[in-house]
Image (tube, rainbow, N blue to C red):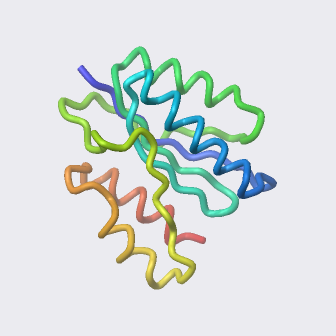
Amino acid sequence: MLSQYLYISTAPTLPCEEVEAILAASARNNTARGITGLLLFNGRNFLQLLEGEADEVAGLMETITADPRHAGVSVLDRRMIEVRTCPDWAMKRVMIAESIANRRDMLERDLPEGLDREVRKMIVNFAVLN
């Protein structure tokens, strides 16, 4: 059985280069751990969807929670799933359009089709807040 987590955290002083380094490391490490997902960063907060074997995702969440580069890790949703919604994404960065008006349309186009409706709503709501 697979596990899926959706969490947010705060990283107000993280430079773009560091975000890119996190993405590169995530893509590399997640492939080895069989974890897939997506990441949004709005310049202040992360929202990340992780999915994979329950033990692997739980272990990664422990690592993420202990990472000093961000704070206030809060799990928005945790569920068991039968099928991955991001099977081909070791860690995809979903870009947030500069224009708040365009964010919803852009995300609706870029988010995976199989994503649970409530999880999709949380991701879109996060993106349109800033």
Image quarter hosting the N terminus = top left
Q: Residue at x 50, y 64 (%)?
A: 95
Does 37 sit left or right of 81 as displayed?
Answer: right
Q: Position of residue 116 (x, y in %)?
A: 25, 49
Image quarter hosting the C terminus = bottom right
The answer to whether 86 is drawn above or below residue 43 in the figure is above
Quadrant in the rendering for residue 87:
top left
Residue found at the very far top of the displayed protein: 55
Q: Position of residue 91 (x, y in %)?
A: 45, 43
Which of the pair 26/42 is nearer the observer?
Answer: 26
Q: Position of residue 59 (x, y in %)?
A: 52, 18
The answer to whether 120 is drawn above or below residue 106 in the figure is above
Q: Residue at x 36, y 33 (%)?
A: 51
Q: Position of residue 67 (x, y in %)?
A: 71, 31
Q: Residue at x 64, y 29 (%)?
A: 65
Which of the pair 11/25 is nearer the observer?
Answer: 25
